[in-house]
């Protein structure tokens, strides 16, 4: 398989879409570096934690997953984690930037707590850029090859027509612009830069964004069946499984029947 033996760094790996992507990658035979602030249960992925000492390339370690507790908004912590991953696995073939959060829905921007604004910006924008910067400089640029897949959102192209989440939608628009700009910068290399744009996905992510308000959570999905995490993981696996000379630059994955006025995005 195309992903057999590839080393993948995945952020936001502890639950939801991140956990589903990790499971799919593990099944496809990839080696996983799982970055998350919350502990990742690697046994649920069908893999075991790597021992402290592992062989260098061209050999691969016996165990296929390492978990690193990292706040991706802290560049020094990110860079240490990536440096140690390269030391353990020899290189990084794929980066999946999945970590993200939305806070304070459905409050309008002026009613948000500044701490929530800072937290969202630091995770959704700084964090994505910090991990990408470190992976490029620690591994991909020296090899001139690799794949960066950013999990953005359909709302990065067009915010939904209802109040609230201005910061989150702005973050997703920034991710789209960054993805496109980075792709241009890396033209002439074999480093692909891709965007996967989920629509409405039923995960803990949506529960968090509305403060775990059950009624408000269920109102998101009224009148249609939302996607589930595995749908996004299947799409990610398809994009990542293409040979390096093929770039599926962007893919929108949305629920059939989702009305335009209700598109809220992952």
Image (cartoon, rainbow, N blue to C red):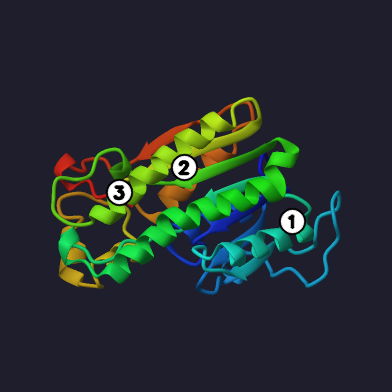
Which quadrant does the N terminus fall into? top right
Which secondary structure, mark 1? helix
Indicate which label's residue lies in the foreground, 1 or 3: 3
Residue 59 - label: none
In the picture provided, is 94 more to the left or to the right than 235? right
Residue 208 in view here: no
Q: Nearer the viewer, residue 30 or 81?
A: 81
Mark 1 touches mark 3? (CB < 8 Å):
no
Q: Nearer the viewer, mark 3 or mark 2?
A: 3
Question: Residue 251's spot in the image, x, y percent?
Answer: 41, 35
Relative placement, left or right, of 16 versus 183 is left
Spatial CA span between label 1 and label 2: 27 Å
Q: Residue at x 46, y 66 (%)?
A: 15
Q: CA distance from mark 1 to mark 3?
A: 32 Å
Task: List the residue tagged with mark 1.
Answer: 86
**Residue, x 60% and y 67% (percent of image)?**
77
> How many numbered discs?
3
**What secondary structure is found at the residue carrying circle 2?**
helix
Within 10 Å of the Cα at label 3, are there few (<14), some (14-19), or many (20+) other Cα atoms? some
Circle 3 sits on which residue? 170
List x then y, in percent, for residue 160.
19, 45
Q: Nearer the viewer, residue 228 or 128?
A: 128
Label 1 crowding class (10 Å Cα cut-off): few <14, some 14-19, many 20+?
A: some
Looking at the image, tell me whether mark 3 or mark 2 is earlier in sequence order: 3
Q: Which mark is residue 235?
A: 2
Q: Marks 3/2: CA distance?
A: 24 Å
Q: Quadrant of residue 93?
A: top right
Q: Nearer the viewer, mark 1 or mark 2?
A: 1
Point 32% across, 54% down: residue: 201
x, y percentage for residue 75? 56, 62
Q: Secondary structure at mark 3?
A: helix
């Amino acid at each position: 398989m195309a992903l057999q033996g590839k080393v993948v760094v995945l952020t936001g790996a502890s639950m939801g879409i991140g956990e589903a992507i990790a499971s799919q990658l593990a099944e496809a035979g990839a080696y996983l570096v799982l970055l998350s602030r919350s502990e990742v249960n690697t046994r649920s992925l069908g893999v075991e934690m790597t021992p402290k000492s592992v062989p260098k390339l061209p050999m691969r370690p016996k165990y296929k997953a390492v978990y690193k507790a990292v706040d991706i908004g802290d560049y020094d912590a990110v860079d240490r984690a990536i440096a140690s991953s390269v030391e353990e696995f020899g290189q990084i073939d794929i980066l999946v930037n999945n970590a993200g959060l939305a806070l304070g829905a459905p409050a309008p921007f002026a009613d948000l707590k500044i701490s929530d604004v800072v937290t969202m910006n630091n995770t959704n924008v700084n964090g994505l850029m910090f991990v990408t910067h470190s992976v490029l400089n620690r591994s991909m640029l020296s090899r001139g090859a690799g794949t960066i897949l950013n999990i953005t959102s359909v709302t990065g192209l067009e915010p939904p027509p209802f109040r609230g989440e201005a910061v989150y939608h702005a973050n997703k628009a920034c991710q789209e612009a960054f993805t496109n700009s980075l792709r241009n910068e890396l033209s002439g290399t074999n480093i692909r830069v891709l965007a996967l744009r989920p629509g409405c996905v039923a995960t803990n992510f949506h529960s968090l964004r509305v403060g775990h308000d059950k009624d408000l959570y269920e109102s998101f999905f009224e009148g249609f069946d939302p996607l589930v995490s595995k749908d996004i993981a299947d799409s990610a696996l398809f994009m990542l499984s293409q040979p390096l000379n093929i770039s599926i630059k962007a893919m929108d994955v949305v629920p059939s029947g989702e009305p335009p006025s209700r598109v809220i995005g992952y």
